[in-house]
Amino acid sequence: MISPDGHDVPTAPAAAEHQTVDPSRPAREPLYPEATRELADQRTRLAPGPAKAFRAFSQNVFAPGALPTKTKQLIAVAVAHVTQCPYCIRGHTRAALRQGATGEEIMEAIWVAAEMRAGGAYAHSALALDTIAHEPEQHASGVEAIANVGETGSHANATSAE
């Protein structure tokens, strides 16, 4: 669904989609407010220049170019899952479907996003290992073996060298 201000920024899911009904508990406000025409108008009224520029930017980014619009929307679905924006997830999933993406293509894009997010955490563990190796006496004794792996070529050699 297109946002109430007419560009491809997604709208919020309906409030009912966020809540489970439990009559024994007091009603709570939804975690995310529903996107409405009033909110869109307020954004534009409070900052008309940036709002206009953002709409133009969004329209240009998602226009067909070297990448077809469907591919751009699949990228947007994947990125929306990494940024964890529920408005973006719903809106760009709808836009991808409108551009002809299949459920299989959308799910595959989401798996790519999941792998990249997990891969980033795994790859950045090198920073933690480097810090552990270079902080004197701030870690458990087994970490010296990890620090020596690069020097000896294997964990077994590093452990036997102690």
Image (cartoon, helix red, strand yellow):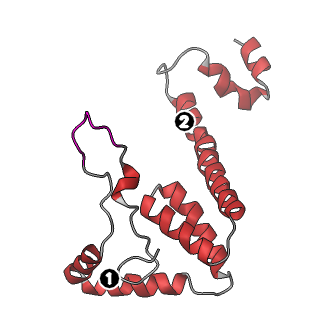
Q: Callout 1 environment at 10 Å: few (<14), some (14 to 19), or many (20+)?
A: some
Q: Is residue 104 above or below residue 124?
A: below
**Magenta extent:** 21-28
Disc 2 residue type (three-letter): Ala
Task: Please report whichever mark, 1 or 2, sits nearer to the chain's N-terminal start.
Answer: 1
Q: Are marks 1 and 2 in contact (CB under 8 Å)?
A: no
Instruction: Identify the residue under disc 1.
Output: 51
Instruction: Identify the residue under disc 2.
Output: 128
- Residue at 57% over, 14% down: 141
Q: Of 22 and 160, which appears nearest the observer?
A: 22
- Residue at 35% over, 47% down: 19
Q: Callout 2 environment at 10 Å: few (<14), some (14 to 19), or many (20+)?
A: few
- Whether the magenta-drawn stretch holds residue 27 is answered as yes
Extreme residue in the front direction: 23
Mark 2: secondary structure:
helix
Q: Which mark is residue 39?
A: none
Q: Main secondary structure of the magenta part?
A: loop
- Residue at 50% over, 20% down: 139
The mark lying in front, picked from 1 and 2, is 1
